[in-house]
């Protein structure tokens, strides 16, 4: 029996709704497997701003730092679009959380569920058998370079150190050794100096993994290859902004953004274990907020990833993943996937399934 002590940051838009569904599922898991659930709920993003606080209040950050396991809904929305720079929910909360907790490895899977293949815009034969993972560098590059305005315009600097590239490349190769042993590194080395460093460093790291095949692709070409030969990829390794763009594209292969979880990880000393933030890859979807329409599956799967990666609870995590598959196969889903259940109903269905099946 363990205590699952984590920081819960529901955030904005549909965040609190999909969050409530995930919390219901976590309670079911805790009951079934005899664990104690201790969720420390805090404000983040626009919700914090509306409460008169900073986008990342100290309390929220301190809790995240202390528990080292964070379940986050989504942040941002048009309501806060007039704000500038770090007053904005994304720049003022999500990015500092990533940077200050050193969550440099962002992991986003792409393995279309059989039940959703028909919903994707590509032909079935282009999707069947697709199973890759994108490893996106998350704390460097253009997102965190110097940015600003001068009399002539604006600038965003893109920088990478060799150490930053090396540590993320190691994670990609380590993961590939447990899978189909192939890394596809994506850069723009025909134009960008940071990409030339990226490619050189990845080639150096690859020397320690003689069993892993390494392929390099330019990011513009990659956008096409992902649509025409998705099945060829195993681990896709890329820098921060290219990873942002490519993972939205990858979500289309899965038939819906609403079913894809993500983990953002930092690896400390072995005794301290992993620090992880888990969140759906979708955003705050303000247009459908507070209507019970949002699909909670990505958030529920993010909670499952938290159990596995931060708490070592693999059986619990698998119980959730099996329940999600059953929900998808049985059509116990929200309207975006052709079902008629509300956000909370999907959460409750999955929670009940976790409780009743083994
Ligand atoms: C993502 C999001 C964020 C990003 C935004 C909200 C800052 O698009 O996690 O993919 O660009 O990293
Ligand atoms: Mg994105």
Image (tube, helix red, strand yellow):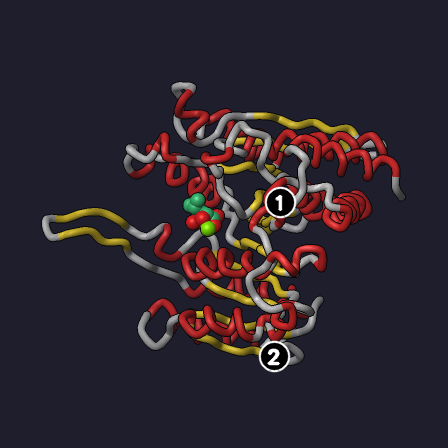
Marks counted in the figure total 2
- Farthest top residue in view: 52
Residue at image position (60%, 62%) is: 133
Which dot marks residue 298? Answer: 1
* Vertical arrangement, residue 29 with respect to residue 227, above or below: above
Find residue 214 and report its horizontal and vertical position in percent. Answer: 56, 78
Which corner quadrant holds the C terminus?
A: top right
Q: Is residue 225 above or below residue 28?
A: below
Q: Quadrant of the N terminus?
A: top right
**Mark 2 lies on residue:** 213
Mark 1 element type: helix
Q: Residues within 10 Å of mark 2 (few under 14, many from 20)?
A: some
Disc 2 element: strand
Quick check: marks 1 and 2 in contact, CB under 8 Å? no
Query: Is residue 255 left or right of 200 when viewed as pictured?
Result: right
- Report, in whole angstroms, how far the alpha carbon at label 1 lies from the one at label 2: 31 Å
Q: Quadrant of residue 218?
A: bottom left
């Amino acid at each position: 029996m363990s205590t699952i002590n984590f920081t819960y940051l529901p955030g904005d838009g549909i965040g609190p709704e999909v969050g409530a569904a995930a919390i219901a599922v976590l309670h079911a898991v805790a009951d079934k497997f005899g664990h104690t659930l201790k969720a420390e709920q805090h404000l983040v993003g626009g919700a914090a701003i509306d409460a008169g606080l900073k986008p990342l209040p100290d309390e929220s950050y301190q809790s995240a730092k202390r528990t080292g396991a964070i379940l986050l809904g989504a942040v941002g929305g048009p309501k806060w679009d007039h704000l500038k720079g770090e007053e904005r929910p994304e720049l003022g909360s999500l990015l500092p959380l990533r940077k200050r907790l050193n969550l440099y490895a962002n992991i986003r899977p792409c393995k279309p569920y059989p039940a959703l293949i028909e919903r994707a815009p590509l032909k079935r034969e282009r999707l069947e058998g697709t199973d890759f993972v994108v490893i996106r560098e998350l704390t460097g590059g253009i997102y965190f370079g110097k940015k600003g305005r001068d009399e002539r315009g604006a600038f965003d600097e893109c920088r990478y150190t060799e150490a930053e590239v090396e540590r993320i490349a190691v994670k990609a190769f380590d993961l590939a050794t447990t899978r189909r042993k192939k890394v596809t590194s994506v850069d723009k080395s025909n134009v960008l100096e940071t990409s030339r460093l990226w490619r050189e460093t990845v080639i150096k790291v690859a020397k320690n993994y003689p069993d892993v095949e390494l392929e390099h692709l330019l990011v513009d070409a990659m956008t096409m290859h992902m649509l025409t030969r998705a099945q060829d990829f195993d681990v896709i390794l890329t820098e921060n902004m290219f990873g942002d763009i490519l993972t939205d594209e990858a979500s289309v292969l899965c038939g819906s953004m609403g079913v894809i979880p993500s983990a953002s990880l930092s690896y400390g000393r072995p005794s301290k274990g992993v620090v992880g933030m888990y969140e759906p890859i979708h955003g705050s979807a303000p247009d459908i907020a507070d209507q019970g329409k949002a699909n909670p599956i990505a958030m529920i799967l993010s909670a499952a990833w938290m159990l596995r990666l931060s708490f070592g609870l693999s059986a619990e995590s698998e119980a959730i993943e099996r329940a999600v598959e059953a929900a998808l196969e049985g059509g116990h889903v929200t309207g975006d996937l052709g079902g008629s259940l509300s956000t909370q109903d999907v959460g409750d269905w999955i929670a009940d399934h976790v409780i009743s099946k083994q």
